Image (cartoon, rainbow, N blue to C red):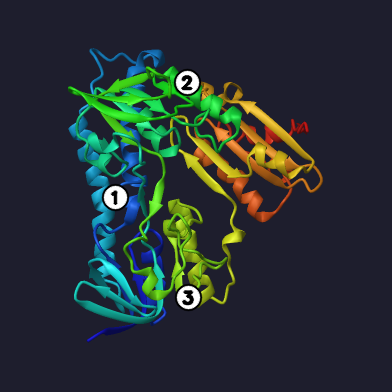
Amino acid sequence: MSKAFDAIVIGTGQAGPHIARRLASSGMKVAIIERKFFGGTCVNTGCIPTKTMIASAYAAHMARRAAGFGVKIDGAVNVDMQRVKARKDEISGQSRTGLESSLKKIENCTVFQGHARFESPHEISVGTERLTADRIFVNVGARAIVPDMPGVNQIDYLTNSSMMGVDFLPKHLIVVGGSYIGMEFAQMFRRFGSEVTIIEMAPRLVQHEDEDVSAAVLEIVKNEGIHVRLNAKCISFARRGEKIVARVDCADPPDEVSGTHVLLAVGRRPNTDDLGLENAGIIVDERGYIGVDDQLRTNVPDIWAVGDCNGKGGFTHTSWNDAEIVTANLLDNDPRRVSDRITAYALYIDPPLGRAGMTEAQVRKTGRKALIGTRPMTRVGRAVEKGETQGFMKILVDANTHEILGASILGTGGDEAIHSILDVMYAKKPYTVIQRAMHIHPTVSELIPTMLGELKPLDG
């Protein structure tokens, strides 16, 4: 016999719990389902644990630089990887157990643990249980892609998930993939003490960014002793004794990199292949992402897809915003849409990259008249004082409307400073709002008005 609810939420990543709470507080009877770890990627294998580990790596890095700040440390700086992992587990675990506990205390909300599967557009099975509801919200997240590269199944490889179990120092970590996940782990483990080699098939790192950003990121990691192999083709793997050998080109004999461990960081895929979506008639694209409209509705009435599984963002903040869009439309008579939001994210290497809006390349592609401003971090007092002068700031403005089109801040505090730009972009106000603002000294943000006072035409 089935159990009837007003709404079913599948998955407890960033979007699911928010939707469940809002619906339950409105008086609806809600079921929320989690098959494994509460909190999704962010809490268990993404933002929280990785940024915790990055903090440990930063501490080690600063300890090695201590003499330059007049601080004397006797002896070598050693990293206790078991303690690093224990700290990460503690912080991540608190978030996971806290979320689980809070969900189980919500009035009008029932938590089910097990694998959810559609039996029809309004019926979900969870083990032997059968649940029905008029509204269903899919929030099942994504997982690491394991590429079909020759020899990959003959080696023990790591992904962003299995890296969470590492409590030792790899002697030589080979990172396949030079984008966000790969870059963060590469720098992190180099600072822990591993030798690190990045293998990237594209001609530059973080290839979705502008070329000047990619070049600066390459310089940053090379300055820390990370080896980088770009334009890698015909990648394959083989085990030779205790070593793993990665082929990085198509030559005969091939160029090879020999390491002890391999991290695969070449992208992610949605967790939609075992949900029985076909039983509900839900359409997915060729990569498995659930198709949604501008208000995150699937092709089946009263079924929504939120978070990483819809291909509309892939970040914690976009997942949370998905939940806000859905609940605003359902409960608040507020017609919010995905197209309302501005692209924004960060790359958490050190120094971090904060991004908002369009890249320079994207602006050029539009053909519109634009202005550009740049400033190296060597000319930002706060960065000089901290001894962290790598990177630069860049901003692009529409020459006619004076609205800000996009910005990149690669430098200390860039992941925070970008928000002063982002907020003005949402307000659709001219750049002069920031240019004329009095910012606090000494900060990174105080140089944004200065940069805006030095705008020049973007060459065609």
Marks 3, 2: nearer the viewer = 3
In the rendered image, which residue does mark 1 sit on? 44
Give residue 27's position: percent from left, percent from top.
38, 82
Q: Nearer the viewer, mark 1 or mark 2?
A: 1
Q: Closest to the observer: 398 or 361? A: 361
Cα gap from disc 1 to disc 2, whole angstroms: 33 Å
Quadrant in the picture for residue 237:
top left
Among all residues in the image, which is located at the extreme front?
Answer: 252
The residue labelled by disc 3 is 300
> Which numbered disc, 3 or 1, marks the residue that appears first in the sequence?
1
Residue ID for mark 2? 387
Q: Is residue 79 left or right of residue 400?
A: left
Q: Are marks 3 and 2 in contact (CB under 8 Å)?
A: no
Depth-wise, is mark 3 or mark 1 nearer the camera? Answer: 3
Query: How far apart in space, not on screen, are marks 3 and 2 (Cα)?
Result: 55 Å
Q: Is residue 374 above or below residue 252?
A: below
